[in-house]
Image: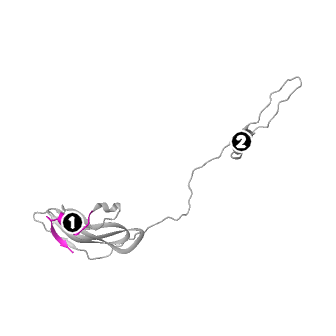
Amino acid sequence: MKKFILLFAIVSIALVSCDVEQKKEMKLPDVDVDVDTEAGQLPTFDVDWADVDLKTTTKTVKVPKVVVVMEEVEVEVPYIDVDMPDAGEKEERNLVVEAEVIETEHDLKIQKVYANNKNLVVVATLEELSQTLGDKKLRVSDQLTLNAPEDLNVKYYIVGEKPNRIFNSAHKYFSSMNDVEQKLKDYSVIYSK
């Protein structure tokens, strides 16, 4: 009895989940007492299963959007003009130090520029401020203009705690200014704030 109920349930589900269209009528066989039979005909069905189309539709949904507006303003920036003996042509370029911070605002300031042969090291300090950012991130920067021979190598050192962001891998971080001074003891200071 359980098998019959299970079979009935499966057949019922199969019939409900598809579109069945009968193509021919059922005809039972004619039976003669002489036991002569004439061939009968079972009904045939054309079964159309679910038709699935994959497409897109346009919906209006809310997505987070951050808009950063960059505007040009005139500000005073330090200008360093370097003349080196037997050096080639000079080129004016901006030396920009940047850090990406989260959780709280920070202040980033260039403090010194060191030189040794054809190497320059720009040293900045990164200080945490009291204003919170919530879940936002912020890029802070400082810059100066350098007019010096084109072939100078420039490195950037930041004194302060390195924020945990991939962007901050471009510069080397130090815990104190003393650590930087020890590393650059063979260099001369050509700019100091």
**Picture coordinates of residue 91, whole percent (x, y):** 20, 66
The local secondary structure at tag 2 comes to helix
Q: For the magenta stretch, what is the residue range?
A: 172-193
Tag shown at residue 179: 1
Q: Looking at the picture, which amino acid does disc 2 mark?
A: Leu
Is residue 43 shown in magenta? no
Left or right side of 73 for 84: left
From what the image shows, is residue 74 above or below residue 31?
A: below
From what the image shows, is residue 136 above or below residue 75?
A: above
Left or right side of 90 for 30: right
Depth order, front residue of 111/22: 111
Q: On the rendered image, what quadrant is the C terminus found in?
A: bottom left
Residue sitting at the far right: 33
**Picture coordinates of residue 182, whole percent (x, y):** 17, 65
In the rendered image, which residue does mark 2 sit on? 6
Residue sitting at the far front: 2
